[in-house]
Image (spheres, rainbow, N blue to C red):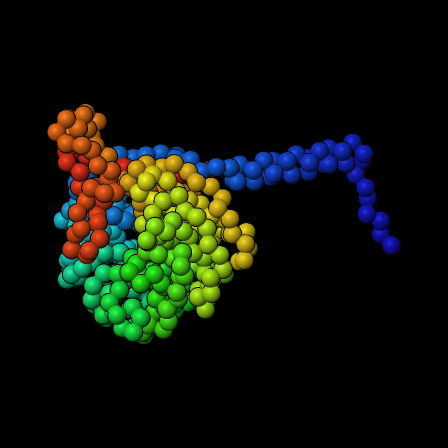
Amino acid sequence: MNQIPHPPSGLAAALGLSVFLSLGQMAAAADSAAGPYKILATTQIPAAGGIDYVTADSAGRRVYVACGSVVSVFDLDTFKLAGSLPAASGHGVAIDPESHTGLVSGNPAVFFNTQTLEPIKTVPAPGADGYIFDPLTHHFIILSHRAPNLRVIDSRDGSVAGTVDAIGPEGANAAVEQGATDGEGHLYFDIENQHHIAVVDAKTLQVTGHFDLGEKGGAPAGLAIDAKNHILFAMCRGTNGGAPTCVILSAIDGKIITTLPLAGGSDGAAFNPHTMEAFSSHGNGTLSIIKENSPTDFALEETMQTKAGAKTCTLDLNTDHIVLITREPLPGAAAAAGSEAPARPPEASAPPDGSGRRRGGRASGPQLLDVIFIGR
């Protein structure tokens, strides 16, 4: 039998030390990765008007912010302004990375080329509000608080692929806030005025079910999904004195797994499959971070301070960075405005728009748009 030669004792000791150091370095890296989140950078530009949602295109390395009548585009790596799409008013932007197209959710909705930032066509969309992109069907879906609750646009050519008038129980109209897709043919939408999740078939656009969020699930406004484990995170603002709560439930049968407290009223959510964390952003300037230890074990991992009015968020899957947006008075202008009228928080300063919900930050005086990049 052949004998495997042993290295000299000195070499063995050196190899052992090398392995020890490597393991130590790996442990240090793991500890660093598990450290607290912090603001890495804040990019500021003059604000052109109200804001609502923010969208990261991880593949294209861009983040899109609709502000007033302009969509501003920022680089996800340098955090700098990279371009703009003028004459495109809306609540936010849905992106199809494969087709290199985007859709500004407004009335009209603006369908554009993400590589050139040139508009291609417009689509009438009364009541346009939130939006999602479903990669399985190549559909942009515009959400609304009034009929049609869902307006479906083909992301390859901008044509209208269909509408769903009402997705509430028994065909009732629904105040549709945020949506999520599992990429396997199921769409989920939180219904703010019904305290539940509507389930829609991505191909047929038929409502296939409703999930009750229970007594703690009042006014859901943020929604995220762990598609691999089929788990939904419904970020609820709370009603009738109820506290803001994350209701965690099965995306298969709607069974509630657990609930966890949130630091404020949510208007945006995201889930990171790399870190197994769900994020809920709040207008009071906080971000709640929930850790999924297993499909049955969840914990409130961290609550970090962001900025007042930063109520919506998006996720860069390449860097695991979370991006939030808000507005603030231009330095110097705040003092002048303060002498004329009392200041109001950004989340409360905007009157309802045509969608029936508020677009953040129509405060008086010159404003700055803040794009906030968060990571470890």
Q: Is residue 6 visible?
A: yes
Q: Indicate the quadrant where residue 80 lies.
A: top left
At x 17%, y 47%, the residue is 351
Residue 24 screen position, x and y as percent: 64, 35
At x 20%, y 66%, the residue is 147
Residue 168 screen position, x and y as percent: 29, 68
Query: Does 253 appear above or below 356?
Result: below
Q: Nearer the viewer, residue 19 or 2?
A: 19
Query: Does 322 appear above or below 103?
Result: above
Q: Nearer the viewer, residue 320 or 149?
A: 149
Q: Quadrant of the N terminus?
A: bottom right
At x 34%, y 39%, the residue is 285
Q: Indicate the quadrant where residue 50 lies.
A: top left
- Is 165 left, or right, of 224 in this rendering? left
Q: Nearer the viewer, residue 226 or 82?
A: 226
Q: Is residue 117 visible?
A: no
Q: Residue furthest right?
A: 1
Q: Residue furthest front?
A: 241
Residue 192 screen position, x and y as percent: 30, 58
All told, the count of numbered labels is 0
Residue 343 screen position, x and y as percent: 20, 33
At x 23%, y 70%, the residue is 165
